[in-house]
Image (cartoon, rainbow, N blue to C red):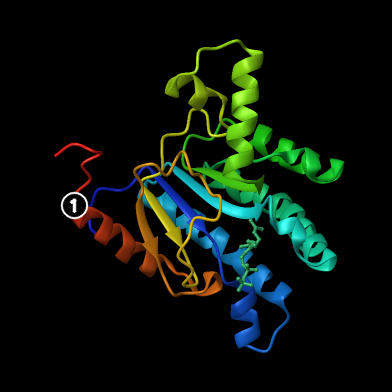
């Protein structure tokens, strides 16, 4: 990564293709998720090193509950294990952790792990790693509107943003989806309003910092006009 490049403030990723990666290697789908978790770690570290401030990763959607029970249970355990192992790494690297989504559907144990990780890393001033957990953009917007009503706030962009799970986090600059699928799947619909979109064929477990470098270079060559001319 050369010094002249503008580093995006906020990168969001739909980490897709864990299952297909595993299948292509004759492994169980869960092996793909395990490998995907390792890539979460390496990409988070890299983004922090180059000065990205927010990395928002789609780890579990409101629709993912429809998966086989065993796979859902595996993902919950993996998440709990990941967060517990990662605490030391977050602190060592000055990374803050934050979760978005409706966490109330998770087990008390997982909710506790999430809360503890958020609290213990709250003083970090480097990258904020945001995990979207039981997250769906429509659900987030509905919950935000309910909060607006409860607080009797005027319906303005600013007030609505202050009630979103991402309150205080700037809009997305770069949105990436791996594995060849070309859709947003209910992810950060509000926050992606002016994001530059990148769709790559790579399955998430094969995604590398070199590919991210190429995306950031491409981002630098795009002209963002935000509706102006
Ligand atoms: C999409 O692959 C991935 C998910 C639904 C879950 C994302 C989870 C991880 C990257 C690992 C765990 C994360 C953390 C933070 C510990 P898919 O299963 O939809 O793959 P497919 O489309 O090929 O079936």
- The percent coordinates of residue 57 (x first, y second) are 55, 52
**Residue at the disc numbered 1:** 4
**Compared to 59, does 161 lie above or below?**
above
Side of 92 relative to 229 (left or right): right
Q: State the image coordinates of residue 85 (x, y, percent, origin top left).
A: 70, 54
Residue closer to the observer: 10 or 183: 183
> Can residue 144 be seen from the camera position used here?
yes
Q: Is residue 99 visible?
A: no
Q: Looking at the rendering, which quadrant does residue 185 occupy?
A: bottom right
Image height of 35 relative to 225, above or below:
below
- The answer to which image quadrant residue 148 occupies is top right
Between 215 and 228, the one nearer to me in the picture? 228
| Residue at 47%, 70% in the rendered image | 207
Q: Position of residue 84 (x, y in %)?
A: 73, 50
Q: Is mark 1 within 8 Å of ligand 1?
A: no
Considering the image in quadrants, where does the C terminus appear?
A: top left
């Amino acid at each position: 990564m050369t010094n002249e490049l503008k580093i995006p403030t906020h990168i969001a990723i739909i980490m897709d293709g864990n299952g297909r990666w595993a299948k292509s290697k004759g492994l169980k789908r869960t092996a793909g998720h395990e490998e995907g978790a390792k890539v979460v770690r390496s990409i988070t570290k890299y983004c922090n090193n180059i000065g990205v401030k927010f990395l928002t990763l789609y780890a579990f959607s409101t629709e993912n509950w429809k998966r086989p029970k065993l796979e859902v249970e595996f993902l919950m355990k993996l998440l709990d294990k990941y967060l517990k192992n990662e605490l030391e790494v977050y602190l060592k690297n000055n990374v803050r952790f934050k979760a978005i989504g409706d966490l109330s559907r998770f087990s008390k144990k997982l909710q506790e792990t999430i809360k503890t990780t958020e609290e213990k890393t709250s003083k970090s001033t480097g990258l904020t790693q945001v995990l979207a957990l039981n997250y769906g953009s429509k659900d987030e917007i509905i919950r935000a509107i309910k909060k607006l009503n409860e607080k009797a706030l005027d319906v303005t962009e600013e007030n609505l943003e202050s009630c979103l799970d991402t309150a205080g986090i700037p809009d997305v600059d770069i949105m990436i989806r791996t594995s060849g699928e070309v859709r947003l799947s209910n992810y950060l619909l509000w926050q992606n309003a002016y994001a530059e979109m990148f769709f790559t064929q790579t399955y998430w477990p094969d995604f590398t910092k070199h590919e991210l470098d190429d995306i950031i270079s491409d981002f630098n060559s795009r002209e963002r006009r935000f509706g102006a001319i």
